[in-house]
Structure formats: structure tokens, C-alpha cells
Image (cartoon, helix red, strand yellow):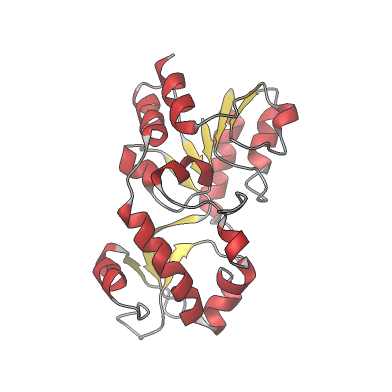
């Protein structure tokens, strides 16, 4: 199985969070723009940060690493992709079993009436307007179905990810610094079970010393090569 982070999508043109010089959190304090508290108290500040990122995601395409994982799944080599990403590039590349630990941008939710709506219904509005999307039922500001700071991971997705982790004989970590808890517990559990851990990330990670193999090279070169083996 695969475990992916922001580094698999940076070759497509989506900035990651922690890379020196280009990481989003070098330019923004996450607690000032990407927390539930900020969304509730100042939704315009949240949307002024999130709107350009959505437009950036919509403008890019899956890359060779995304496509290689989808091909590995088609061949029966890969059972699932667990991802920390919200960009849906895995699905757009053709992956079928994708567990999105931090939610995704495919829907918007109303925290007041609990209704959810397809993001596609609001895409034209968000691409052309600087205003905030609002619930058609009660006019509350809508929130993407992503996990913000101060929010819990979706329980059903986490349980499925744990189950896949228990069954995996090998986990391939791609483009993740393995800094974010509790997601970074899953690769550690693979090692504790005696299964193999492979890490493909440009910079060192917390679990490099536990990995069977560390590949510190471009994901768009490494993953297609692995798919051909």
C-alpha cells in the first residue's frame, strides 16, 4: 500500500507545507488561517487564504507518480492509497481506493444545518468571485470538507486506514515528511508489525532509520520505475 503526502503533488505545481523557501507554513501561520477557530471567528480570512489554493489545485493535473500508483492498483500490486492530501489528484489519475485522512475538496459543508454540497456546484463562483460560498438553506458560510487544525480526523476513514495498515506487507511512503500526528503513526505501526517500510522523500523523515529502503529522489522518477518492476 502507499502512504502519500504533499511531496507527491508538488511536481504538479501544488506547494507543500514545510519545504524550505516554498512551504506554505513559512508564509502563513497555520493557526492564523487554517484552524477551525479562525473559520468560525473570521471566515473571510480563511477564504481569502483558501480560495487561491483551490484555484491552483483546479489548474493542475496529476503527475507521473500519481498515474504510476493508479497503474499499480490496476495491476493488483497496490491495494490502497492512504493520503494526507486534499487535492484529489489520486482519483483524477485513476486510483480507486483512496483514503483521505485530512478530508478533500470535493464537497462543502454547512456547520449549522450539517448539509453538504458538491464543490463542483460552487466552482465557477469560487473561480470568479472574491466572496465566500454560502449555504443555500440558511446562508451560513460553507467550509470545505477538509480537516483543519483543532478538528478530528474523519473516524471512518481512520478506521479503514488502520485496517489496511494491519494487512499490509509493505508500505511505500511517498512525499511525506512524516511530521503530522496521528497520520505518521501508520508507517510506524507497519514497522512494529515486522512488515517492510519504503520511503521516497527528497528530505529526511522521522522514520528513515526504521525503513527497509530510503529513496531520496524525485517521486516522478522513482514511482514509475517501481511500477515497472
For residue 118, side relative to residue 192 (left or right): left
Pick whichever, 22 or 145, lies toward us. 22
Residue 40: x and y in percent read: 54, 80
Residue positioned 60% across, 77% down in the render: 37
Where 72 sits versus 98, above or below?
above
In the picture, residue 89 is in which quadrant? top left
Where 196 sits versus 208, above or below?
above
In this orientation, does residue 59 appear? yes
In this orientation, does residue 150 appear? no
Residue positioned 51% across, 33% down in the render: 2
Residue 47: x and y in percent read: 44, 74
- Badge count: 0
Quadrant where the image shows the C terminus? top left
Pick whichever, 3 or 97, lies toward us. 3
Residue 207: x and y in percent read: 71, 34
In the picture, residue 136 is in which quadrant? bottom left
Amino acid at each position: 500500500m502507499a502512504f502519500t503526502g504533499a511531496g507527491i503533488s508538488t511536481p504538479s505545481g501544488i506547494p507543500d507545507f514545510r519545504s524550505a523557501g516554498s512551504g506554505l507554513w513559512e508564509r502563513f501561520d497555520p493557526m492564523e488561517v487554517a484552524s477551525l477557530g479562525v473559520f468560525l471567528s473570521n471566515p473571510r480570512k480563511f477564504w481569502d487564504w483558501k480560495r487561491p489554493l483551490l484555484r491552483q489545485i483546479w489548474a493542475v493535473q496529476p503527475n507521473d507518480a500519481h498515474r504510476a500508483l493508479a497503474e499499480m492498483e490496476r495491476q493488483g500490486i497496490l491495494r490502497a492509497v492512504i493520503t494526507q492530501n486534499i487535492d484529489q489528484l489520486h482519483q483524477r489519475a485513476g486510483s480507486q481506493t483512496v483514503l483521505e485522512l485530512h478530508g478533500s475538496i470535493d464537497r462543502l459543508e454547512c456547520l449549522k444545518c450539517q448539509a453538504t454540497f458538491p464543490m463542483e456546484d460552487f466552482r465557477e463562483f469560487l473561480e470568479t468571485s472574491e466572496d465566500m460560498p454560502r449555504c443555500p438553506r440558511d446562508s451560513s458560510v460553507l467550509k470545505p470538507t477538509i480537516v483543519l487544525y483543532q478538528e478530528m480526523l474523519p473516524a471512518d476513514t481512520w478506521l479503514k486506514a488502520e485496517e489496511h495498515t494491519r494487512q499490509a506487507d509493505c508500505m511505500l511512503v511517498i512525499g511525506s515528511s512524516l511530521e503530522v500526528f496521528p497520520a505518521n503513526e501508520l508507517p510506524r505501526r507497519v514497522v512494529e508489525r515486522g512488515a517492510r517500510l519504503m520511503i521516497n522523500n527528497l528530505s529526511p523523515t522521522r522514520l528513515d532509520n526504521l525503513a527497509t529502503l530510503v529513496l531520496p529522489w524525485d517521486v516522478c522518477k522513482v514511482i514509475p520505475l517501481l511500477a515497472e518492476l
